Image (tube, rainbow, N blue to C red):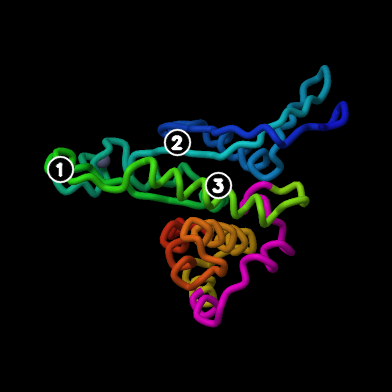
Amino acid sequence: MPRPGEISLAHRGVLFLDELPEFDARALEVLRQPLEDKVVTISRASGTLTFPANVMLIAAMNPCPCGFHGDPTKDCTCAPSAIARYQKRLSGPLLDRIDIHLTVPRVEYEKLADTRLGESSATVRARVVGARARQTARFAGTGIVTNAEMGPSQVRDHCALDAAGEGLMRAAMRQLQLSARGYHRVLKLSRTIADLAGADRVSAAHLAEVLQYRPQDAG
Ligand SMILES: [Zn+2]
């Protein structure tokens, strides 16, 4: 139980921002601090208040203002300068704090109508529950619940790479120009991918999957 005046980080939520580049650039920049600190502090003339803000940030955006940039079936009508301006509305430091960047292409009719089913939600759920159970066991008694909350010493303890993983990480640090924060975020997400696979150690394959999700142009 938190003491009076102390903010509980136990309550977690999801913050979903649709059409991310449409938000005011200053609002997005001030979002960085609560994402790091898990609290938001609001200062007014009458006083300063701090609220819990422990969220998982999920955001969606189009590839360009018209939405068809890169679409195989329909032409994008945006000028190259408009596309660049649209994508530049998001700063590198904000993108750096988003661990998983996924491009979601249009789903063709044939795929939607395909009656052969992929994995069921129940199967995926079981995998997620298993990964959470591994994290619960790993962090028992530490006050930490998920891999994302690990500090640097826990990252060292739980995300040690093998020789192949270290080689890959060294190359990725150079190519993606990972910041120290980016480096730790990559390792923590690799731990989660390994947990989803039921693996005790983080392998080069887990790391490689995570590196695909990094923004390609944010440090
Ligand atoms: Zn367009």
Q: Is residue 74 visible?
A: no
CA neighbours of label 3 inside 10 A, class few (<14), some (14 to 19), many (20+) = some
Quadrant, the C terminus: bottom right
Q: Amino acid at mark 2?
A: Leu
Residue segment shown in magenta = 145-168
| Rendered residue at 46%/51% (across/down) | 100
Q: Which mark is residue 114?
A: 1
Q: Secondary structure at mark 3?
A: helix
- Residue 7 badge: none
Residue 72 placement (x, y as % from top left): 16, 49
- Which residue does the numbered mark 2 point to in the structure image? 20
Q: Secondary structure at mark 1?
A: loop
Which residue lies at the image location 15% right of the left edge and 41% below the top edge?
115
Residue 202: x percent and y percent?
A: 54, 68
Is residue 149 a member of the stretch shown in magenta?
Answer: yes
Q: Main secondary structure of the magenta part?
A: helix
- On the question of residue 151 being in view, the answer is yes
**Residue 56 vertical position relative to residue 166 in the rendered view, above or below:** above
Is 50 located above or below residue 188 in the figure? above
Relative to 100, say whether 13 is above or below.
Answer: above
CB contact under 8 Å: marks 2 and 3:
no
